[in-house]
Amino acid sequence: DQAVLFASADLVVHTSASGALPTALLRAMAAGVPAVATRVGGVPEIVSAETGVLVPLQPGPIGDAMVALAADPVRRER
């Protein structure tokens, strides 16, 4: 079941160069899992500072955001 998989994750990473409104991010948010996502399409409308981290589509910022979020359990829980 996808809901169980999302709920068991510490964070979700969605690095797309395009996309209107990714279902994976909506499912992550429904499960209370924070996201690292690129600023494309409708993503900035659903991922905020409260629900995750928006990054440019570049390996450095993506990796930095993943490490920072993974290392901060308080922020992930919030």
Image (spheres, rainbow, N blue to C red):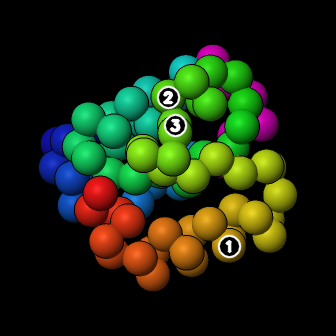
Residue 12 position (above or below residue 23): below
Q: Which residue is mark 2?
A: 46
Q: Secondary structure at mark 2?
A: helix
* Residue contact at pointers 2 and 3, CB within 8 angstroms: yes
- Identified by mark 3, the residue type is Val
> Residue at the spot x=31%, y=71% of the render?
74
N-term mark: 3 or 1: 3
Dominant SS in magenta:
loop
Check disc 2 and give the amino acid type: Ile
Residue range corresponding to the magenta coloring: 15-20
| Residue in view at x 52 percent, y 37 percent | 47
Mark 3: which secondary structure? loop
Residue 9, position as x, y percentages in the image: 30, 61
Disc 3: which residue: 47
* Residue type of the residue flagged with mark 1: Asp
The answer to whether the residue labelled 3 contacts the one labelled 1, judged by CB atoms less than 8 Å apart, is no
Q: Does residue 46 appear left or right of residue 20 in this picture?
A: left
Whether residue 9 can be seen here = no
Badge 1 is on which residue?
64
Q: Is residue 52 left or right of residue 8?
A: right
- For disc 2, the neighbor class at 10 Å (few under 14, some 14 to 19, many from 20) is few
Q: Nearer the viewer, residue 35 or 22?
A: 35
Which quarter of the rendering shows the N terminus?
A: top left
Tell whether label 1 touches label 2 (CB within 8 Å): no
Residues at marks 3 and 1, CA–CA distance in whole angstroms = 17 Å
Residue at position x 57%, y 24% in the image: 45
